[in-house]
Amino acid sequence: MNPFLAVAAVAFSAQALLAQQVDGVLIRCGASSGHAFFLRDDLTNPEEPKWERDSISAGKILLVRYGDQWDILFDDSLHAYGYRQDGATVLPLIEKGHLLTVAAIGAQYIDTYTFDFLDKRVAWTSNKVGPIVPKVAAYEARCD
């Protein structure tokens, strides 16, 4: 098959998946790695703000859709749960071709995920002031 046609077919099928009403898990992603800026905090970082490599080596991220309701389920170093279970609002923000950006807005954080259905990756950011470690971070993970 022509490589251009193969890429176009994958992109079209990913775009069609996003445009139509699909329920269940849309994409599964694994461990995340990136960098974080840890803000000063009396308990976790009393010295000074600093940049560090950061990762969630055993992490999992699942984008889920149930009708008009969206959620991102994940497993991190603390436990497994979803943003909606945590009381957050989960909203699709931007859809362009094979890319979809979804935000999770909670009382103490705003996390954004850009899922790439063509290259099977997610790039995501986390801006947290609590509950444990105040930080701003950017990560990426491979998906299947």
Image (tube, rainbow, N blue to C red):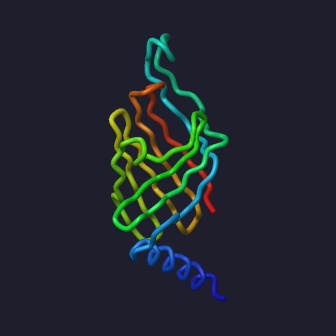
Residue that sits furthest to the front in the current view: 85
Asked if 73 appears above or below 22 in the picture, the reply is: above
Question: Percent from the top left, x then y, of residue 18?
Answer: 43, 71
How many marks on residues? 0
Q: Quadrant of the N terminus?
A: bottom right
Comparing 13 with 7, the one in front is 13
Residue 91 location (% of width, % of height): 34, 55
Q: Position of residue 132 (x, y in %)?
A: 47, 25
Looking at the picture, does residue 8 appear above or below residue 119?
below
Residue positioned 48% across, 36% down in the render: 137
Q: Name which residue lies at 38% across and 50% down.
A: 103
Q: Tell me if 117 is positioned left or right of 144 in this view.
A: left
Tell me the residue at 51%/17% (across/down).
Answer: 44
Residue located 37% across and 68% down the image: 67
In the picture, the quarter occupied by the C terminus is: bottom right
List the single residue furthest toward the bottom.
1
- On screen, residue 3 versus residue 139, left or right, reads right
Pick the front one: 141 or 4:
141
As displayed, is residue 79 above or below residue 121? above
